[in-house]
Amino acid sequence: MDIQWLFLILAIVVLVFGVGVVVANRRKMGSGQRTELPPRPAPSAPPTTTEEPEGDTLVEEPPVVEPEPEPEPVKPLSLRDRLSKARASFSGAFGSILGRGAITDETWDDLEEALLRADVGLGVADGLLEPLKERVKAKEITEPSELLAALQADMIARLADADREVHFDESLEPGQPNVWLFVGVNGVGKTTTIGKVARQQSAAGRTLLLAAGDTFRAAAAEQLGTWAERSNTEFVRGTEGGDPSSVIFDGIERAASKQIDLVLADTAGRLHTKTNLMEELKKVRRVAEKGAGTVTETLLVIDATTGQNGLAQARQFSEATNVTGVVLTKLDGSAKGGIVFAVETELGIPVKLVGVGEQVNDLIPFDPNEFVNALFDTGTDG
């Protein structure tokens, strides 16, 4: 019995101890202390794929570069546009003539004034108007419009049949270059004209040499040297103030030794010595003819803005150097295009080239029909 009671007492003690432990743990939890749990591991990054993202994901695309639009081709100015100042000298008179509705004394006054203002010259003006007056008296012409059309046709006819070709002799043997001499007073655009001709002839496939024979103006040789570089041509110059003839002779001999096709020779437009310019130019021509080359053109360069002064220059130079043709520069900036008629009628020298702008291609062959028609085209600009 005693042992049974002992086991019973031990069982009660164990039970009481267990209940106490449970009660104690509940009290700890009630006081706000919690058991720390280990942190959850971070989710692993999704594997990289090459598939296109879906949904609202923004993808930076390289900017789309729109091709620049092709520039619209620039329409080259017509000769009519270039001759706006020369044309204006006629348009006022033509407007008055057509506005009257009949041919009167004022009609002839207006026509004569327009021709003289354009530097046609008194002799040429009379030569154009007198036959028209006879036709009006004979009743062949009765309307102002008919009169202007007849004048236009007569002006074209006066410029017809001239030899306007700038001659290059294809029959010369290799080592016998063609020589083109350029003459004219300083300031008319002579050196620039040579440079433009050089670019055009080089583009046509001819080999060239430029000879700076204007030794009395240092800037002329430097300017011509620049043009030689632009056209990739041979270039010969002399010492400042040296003999122009020797420079041109040396240039021709060098061209001959290299079998160059064409020599373009600048000449003096003014001398700083007592030597007469025209005598110097005669010497240049003689010396050029003695060399291996052949002078096939002597081109007189005239500034159109000088008007009748240009005619006086043409007369002097033609006597000294046997001028074969005229290059009329700055025609686009002059109201005095009538100098063409004065030069051709009074001196019999054809205008072969005209300058109507600053660019290389603005030096163009002279076309009488296009020129006169441009002067008479008095329609509204724009």
Image: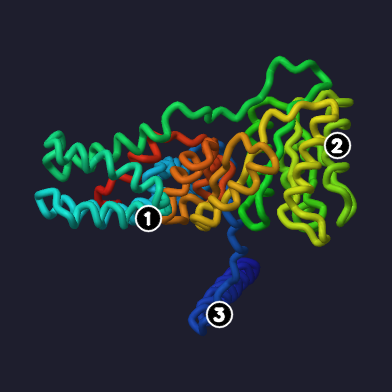
Mark 2 to mark 1 CA distance (whole Å): 43 Å
At horizontal 74% and vertical 27% (from top left) the residue drawn is 178
Residue type, numbered disc 1: Leu
Label total for image: 3
At horizontal 13% and vertical 54% (from top left) the residue drawn is 99
Q: Earlier in the sequence, mark 1 or mark 3?
A: 3
Mark 1 to mark 3 CA distance (whole Å): 122 Å
Q: Earlier in the sequence, mark 2 or mark 3?
A: 3
Task: Look at discs 2 and 1 and give the one toward the viewer.
Answer: 1
**Residue tagged by mark 2?**
249
Q: Nearer the viewer, residue 126 or 325?
A: 126
Residue 55: x, y in percent?
39, 47
Task: Look at discs 2 and 3 and give the one toward the viewer.
Answer: 2
Horizontal side, residue 347 vs residue 157: left or right: right
Q: Are marks 2 and 3 in contact (CB under 8 Å)?
A: no
Q: Nearer the viewer, residue 329 or 141?
A: 141
Residue type, numbered disc 3: Gln
**Residue tagged by mark 1?**
116
At horizontal 71% and vertical 15% (from top left) the residue drawn is 171
Residue 117: x, y in percent?
37, 57
Tag 3's secondary structure?
loop
Rendered image: mark on residue 322: none
Residue 116: tell me if it is visible.
Answer: yes
Residue type, numbered disc 2: Phe
Residue 134: x, y in percent?
21, 39
Q: Are marks 1 and 3 in contact (CB under 8 Å)?
A: no
At horizontal 35% and vertical 38% (from top left) the residue drawn is 155
Mark 2 to mark 3 CA distance (whole Å): 119 Å
